[in-house]
Image: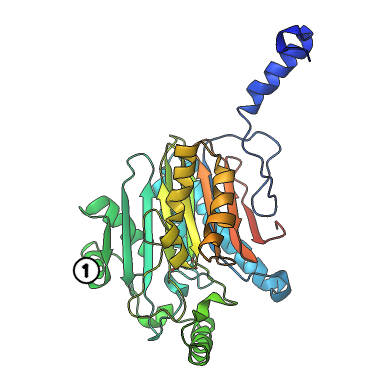
Amino acid sequence: MGTISSLHPAVFYALISALVLSMFVPDSSPAATNSPAHDTPVPRRIVMVIHGGAGTIRRSSMTPEREKKYRDALAKALRTGYKVLAGGGASVDAVEAAIRTMEDSPLFNAGRGAVFTHEGKNEMDASIMVGDTRNAGAVASVSNIRNPITAARRVLDSSRHVMLVGEGAMHFAHEQGLRFEPDSYFFTQERWDRLQKAKAADESQSGMLPYLSGDKFGTVGAVALDAKGTIAAGTSTGGLTDKQWGRVGDSPIVGAGTYADNRTCGVSSTGTGEYYMRGVLAYRVSALMELAGVSLHDAVHRVIHEDLVAIGGTNTGGMIALDAAGNVVMDFNTAGMYRGYIRADGEPHTYLYDEGD
Ligand code: ASP
């Protein structure tokens, strides 16, 4: 076997150029079904990835009209975030702006479309984090706030704390002048019917988590990289249908539902929050990259397909993530996940199913 120095000079230079080029080409995604594959180098800066929840999203149970509604809503969120980034804005502003559009849509389980608790109320959770300072803000168990992600953002910017809950969080939101809506604004027939189904299932199989089977979750999240290289991530949710006793999931928990660190990545999770909290799964992606030198793609793949499954979370969720170089991963172990990304060319790419489209 020849050594590299014994190679013909032309072959040697070709090898060296290939090596150098490979350092600038983003991760291609082996799991093309769950994450976008990129064959050509794309600009590193200005990237946003979003999700609208993971769950039983199947082509067979989707009408073309309904599919279009979801794709349009995802594209709207991506374009809204992109506008901020393309104008030189901060990733945290882009994340908040994108999530607000999804909170304003009844299609997603966040803000207006939040699911119902066992008592028939809407109790929402949200968090947002910035990767340069690793500062974060979160609210949990809040009702009637039109955009919980903005309440989380205000906690980040205008309070001494990281997380506010319940009445206190709502008091703070009032003080901040945030917009509140009546209960009727948050009513969607579909979510109400789902609560009735979940309660009926509750009675027949006590001790089970009814929302684990056959449900679409619909939480929303966004992760962005801005032109300055700062990563931000945010997540907003109504939680799980039929949740009881002030239950809070992973979405407002830094490290479980949301995480951002410029040195590694930004992550937003979606799925049955109990598993994401127990596994500290958003932070785990970052830790695998930082401490074990794993790539973004491999870290997310391991967390979703091994670590989540190892604690019982088969068929329970997914996550979106991007790294400091602008690589994007969208992965899940459910039938589908509403998701999409946008890069410097400004073209939104949206996906619903596990066949990669
Ligand atoms: N993770 C959310 C929760 O457990 C639900 C979801 O993502 O759909 O509250």
Element on which disc 1 rests: helix
Report crowding for label 1: few under 14, some 14 to 19, many 20 or more residues within 10 A (C-alpha): few
Q: Which residue is mark 1?
A: 168
Residue depicted at 55% across the width and 35% down the height: 44
Q: In the image as oriented, which residue stretches furthest toward the front? A: 1
- The part of the image, by quadrant, that contains residue 213 is bottom right
Q: Does residue 232 show up? A: yes
| Total marks in image | 1
Residue depicted at 65% across the width and 66% down the height: 335
Residue 270 percent location from the top left of the image: 50, 62
For residue 126, above or below residue 143: above
150 horizontally vs 65: left or right: left
Residue depicted at 59% across the width and 44% down the height: 298
Task: Please state which of residues 87 and 56 is positioned toward the viewer in this rendering.
Answer: 56
Residue 271 percent location from the top left of the image: 51, 65
Task: Please state which of residues 51 and 212 is positioned toward the viewer in this rendering.
Answer: 212
Type of amino acid under label 1: Gly
285 horizontally vs 68: left or right: left
For residue 106, above or below residue 29: below
- The part of the image, by quadrant, that contains residue 1 is top right
- The part of the image, by quadrant, that contains residue 132 is top left
User: Which quadrant: the C terminus?
Assistant: bottom right
Q: How is the image coloured?
A: rainbow
Residue 315 percent location from the top left of the image: 59, 67
* Cβ of mark 1 under 8 A from ligand 1: no
Q: Does residue 103 show up? A: no
